[in-house]
Each structure stands twice: as C-alpha cells, then as structure tokens.
Image (spheres, rainbow, N blue to C red):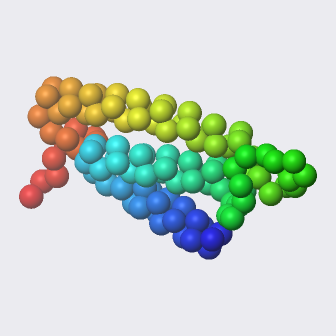
Amino acid sequence: MELVLSLGIGILTASGVWLILRPRTYQVIIGLSLLSYAVNLFIFGVGGLKKNAPPLLTDGADITSFADPVPQSLVLTAIVIGFATTALFLVVMLASRGLTGTDHVDGKEKAK
C-alpha cells in the first residue's frame, strides 16, 4: 500500500512540476493543483495507512491501530483552500487573457 501511495505522490509531483514549467497560464494553474494534491496525499499518508481496522473505538481496542485524525483534518482544510485559490487563479487568468490578448505566462507570443 505504501508503494502505491509513494508512486501516486511521485507521479502527481512530477506532472505538476512539468506543467508549472509550461508557457501557458492554464497549464501552470493545473500544475499547481496537481502539486497541492500531491502534498495532500503526503500529509494524509503521514497520518498512517491502516486497513482492516474499525474506525470507532471499542472496549479493549488497541489505540495504535487507528489513523491519526489531525492529518485528515488538515487535508480536508487544504482541499477547501485549494479549491478557492484555484477558482481565484482562474478568474485572474481570464482577466489577464482579456487585458493582454494572450495566455502566455510572460505575456508574449513566441515568434514563428
């Protein structure tokens, strides 16, 4: 399970960095979103990966078999904040596209 999570985090991080280095603003925004998803998965994984364990405490249950709820709440908060910032970035991108007439990061088209 840890290998699958590690590969998922690595693929999301690599894809996010690759998209951030692209010249168009929409690709940069998607890259930032992928990086935030990778960080969320990392924080979620830090809380511990447990399977076949009950989610509720019962009498005589071992407390070490439960996942830590703090990283889960941090990830939930990060998802909400990430959604809001992505919406803000998209509005800024549309305004920039309307003002400059291009969607390149530096505001200039490459010469053909």
* Nearer-the-camera pick, 62 or 95: 62
Residue drawn 77% across and 52% down?
Answer: 66
Tell whether 43 sits left or right of 87.
right
Q: Residue at x 12, y 54 (%)?
A: 111
Where is 82 relative to 19, above or below? above
Front-most of residues 58 and 62:
58
111 in relation to 2, above or below: above
Residue drawn where x is 56% and y is 33% of the image: 77
Furthest toward the right, the residue is 60
Which of these two is toward me, 59 or 12? 59
Quarter of the figure that contains the C terminus: bottom left
Whether residue 7 can be seen here: yes
- Using the rendered image of the protein, determine whether residue 96 is visible from the camera's viewpoint: no
Please identify the quadrant where the N terminus is shown.
Answer: bottom right
Residue at horizontal 48 percent and vertical 66 percent from the top: 11
Give the side of residue 39 with respect to residue 111, left or right: right
Q: Position of residue 107 (x, y in %)?
A: 22, 38
Give percent across and percent down for residue 13: 50, 59
Question: Would you identify the image quadrant in which residue 96 lies?
Answer: top left
Residue 61, percent from left and from top:
86, 53
Q: Nearer the viewer, residue 26 or 4?
A: 4
Is residue 92 shown left or right of residue 70?
left
Rendered view: 79 above or below 91 = below
